[in-house]
Structure formats: C-alpha cells, structure tokens
Amino acid sequence: MSNTIFQKIIKREIPSTILYEDNDVIAIEDINPVSPVHALIIPKKCIETLNDLSEKDATIVAKMILVAKNLAKELKIDQSGYRTIFNCNDDGGQTVYHIHLHLIGGRKLNWPPG
Ligand code: AMP
C-alpha cells in the first residue's frame, strides 16, 4: 500500500481536520489554505495522478465532485462561488502524489490562475 501523507491521514497516523468521510472518500481542511475555504477531497484508494485514472475509477471521481458540491453548500460558499481543481504532475503544481480535489472559495478568485 502506498504511504503518502494522505494515506497516513486516512489511517489516522497523523492528525487532520476531517470535514467528511465515507467508505470511499475523505475530505479534510488543507493545512496551508490559499483561501478562507480550502478543503481537499481525497479518495481512500491511492491513485497517484490523474494520468493513472482508468474507467473503473469513474464512480469514485464522480463521488469526489459530489462531495465537493455538498461541502460548498455546507461551508456556505455555494452561492458566492468556488473553484475545484486537480493539479497533475510538476507543471500542474502537484506536490502530493495521491489524487485530490481542491475546493477553494470564500474570496474572489483570479483568472487565469498563476
Ligand atoms: P497539490 O499541490 O495539488 O498536490 O496539493 C497538496 C495539498 O496538500 C497542498 O495544498 C498542501 O497544503 C496540502 N497538505 C499537505 N500536507 C497536508 C496535511 N498534513 N494536512 C492537510 N493538507 C496537507
């Protein structure tokens, strides 16, 4: 089994603030938030990058997006707006090689991103 920092969080080996959890997915607060709301939606199955996704992962990816939508409402940014992001590999800014969906909001976000 892979041992990314997110795997350690899932196994409760290191602490985190958990916003949501079910059999397939965990959502936590980002330790270094870039906006007033910054959550990470993480599948419990470790998939290293978006490049490693296959057809059999379609359900889990859809679930991650639905969890982001539900959290946006819970955290009261659904009406003001928010952004969901998957970073992939070095140029995409990925630092943890276990896919995760960023949910950011609570302020006006710039476009295009840096
Ligand atoms: P990325 O750069 O897309 O791979 O995103 C990784 C994210 O994980 C960054 O936003 C980090 O701030 C966040 N992160 C790293 N370690 C932790 C941790 N222990 N708890 C919560 N978030 C973390």
Image: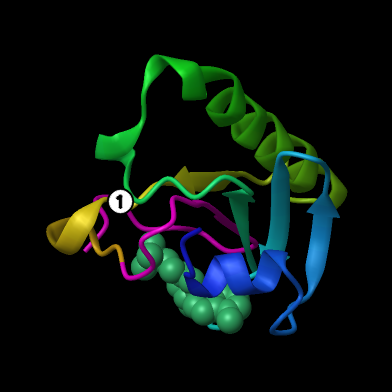
| Residues shaded magenta | 95-114
Residue 47, horizontal then vertical, whole percent = 42, 45
Query: Which residue does the numbered mark 1 point to in the structure image?
Result: 111
Label 1 environment density (alpha carbons within 10 Å; few <14, some 14–19, many ≥20): few
Residue furthest to the top? 55
74 displayed left or right of 7: right
Residue 80 in magenta? no
Answer whether residue 75 is visible to the viewer in this image: no
Q: Residue at x 48, y 18 (%)?
A: 56
47 displayed left or right of 87: right
- The colour scheme of the drawn protein is rainbow
Residue 23, horizontal then vertical, whole percent = 80, 40
Residue 4, horizontal then vertical, whole percent = 47, 70
Q: Is residue 86 above or below residue 89?
A: above
Q: Residue at x 69, y 29 (%)?
A: 66
Query: Magenta: predominant secondary structure element?
Result: loop
67 displayed left or right of 18: left
Q: Is residue 88 above or below residue 8?
A: above
Where, by quadrant of the figure, is residue 6 drawn?
bottom right
Identify which residue, 103 or 112, lies in the foreground.
Answer: 103
Amino acid, disc 1: Trp
Residue 29, horizontal then vertical, whole percent = 69, 70
Answer whether residue 80 is visible to the viewer in this image: yes
Residue 99 in magenta? yes
20 displayed left or right of 28: right
